[in-house]
Amino acid sequence: MKKFLTIAAAIICLCSCAAFRLTPAQEAKIAEAVADSLSQRHYTIDITRIYPRRGPSRVVDGFRLKVNGDKVDSYLPFIGVAYSVDYGSQSNGMSFESTIDEYYVSAPQSDRRQIQFTTRNGNDQLMFTIIVFDNGLSDITVVSRNRETISYSGELRTPLPEK
């Protein structure tokens, strides 16, 4: 009887996990929505994890990076060493709105796009490198002239596929 219940529970778990898988058509729709957002330079990446250079990674919620044409709205946490900050500055250095100076897109592999852009925040110059996969998962690395390099992971907002 115990063996039967264990097998039944395993089958139920496997069936419930299979229900959350996307069909190839749904995956193609998501990949198309991701590519469309990137080509229009209008997208938001919700940050789920931060990777400081020192110490462990941390799960975070409520942070984002938004690109809208030639503007960037960065609301990112920063954990690390600041080599130089503006006198009397109260900000964490990664929360700002600015214009994008240079913007490059490449496709190093068929399932991802790499975006690089530079921007300024006061006296600091920042270079963002974003890798966006076809499923919307994203990795962001920020190299700053005045702060330690820091990385983030998150997900590009896309419309959910219909069932």
Image (cartoon, grey):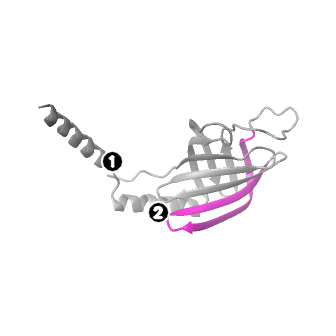
Q: Position of residue 106 (x, y in %)?
A: 61, 67
Q: Amino acid at mark 1?
A: Phe
Residue shown at 35% from the left, 61% from the top: 24
Q: Position of residue 99 (x, y in %)?
A: 74, 53
The span from disc 2 to disc 1 (Cα, nearest Å) is: 20 Å
Q: Nearer the viewer, residue 77 or 161?
A: 77
Q: Which mark is residue 87?
A: none
Helix, strand or loop for disc 2: helix
Q: Which residues are magenta?
A: 93-120
Q: Which mark is residue 20?
A: 1
Would you say 117 lies left or right of 40 here? right
Q: Is residue 9 among the parts visible in the rendering?
A: yes
Main structural element of the magenta stretch: helix, strand or loop?
strand
Which one is in front in this view, the residue at disc 2 or the one at disc 1? 1
Q: Residue 53 is drawn in which quadrant?
A: top right
**Residue 60 located within the stretch drawn in magenta:** no
Image marks 2 and 1: residues in contact by CB distance under 8 Å: no
Location of mark 2 (residue): 32
Q: Is residue 19 among the parts visible in the rendering?
A: no
Q: Residue furthest toward the left? A: 1
**Label 2 CA crowd tier, 10 Å (few <14, some 14–19, many 20+):** some
**Residue 118 located within the stretch drawn in magenta:** yes
Q: Position of residue 26 (x, y in %)?
A: 37, 58
Residue shown at 67% from the left, 60% from the top: 116
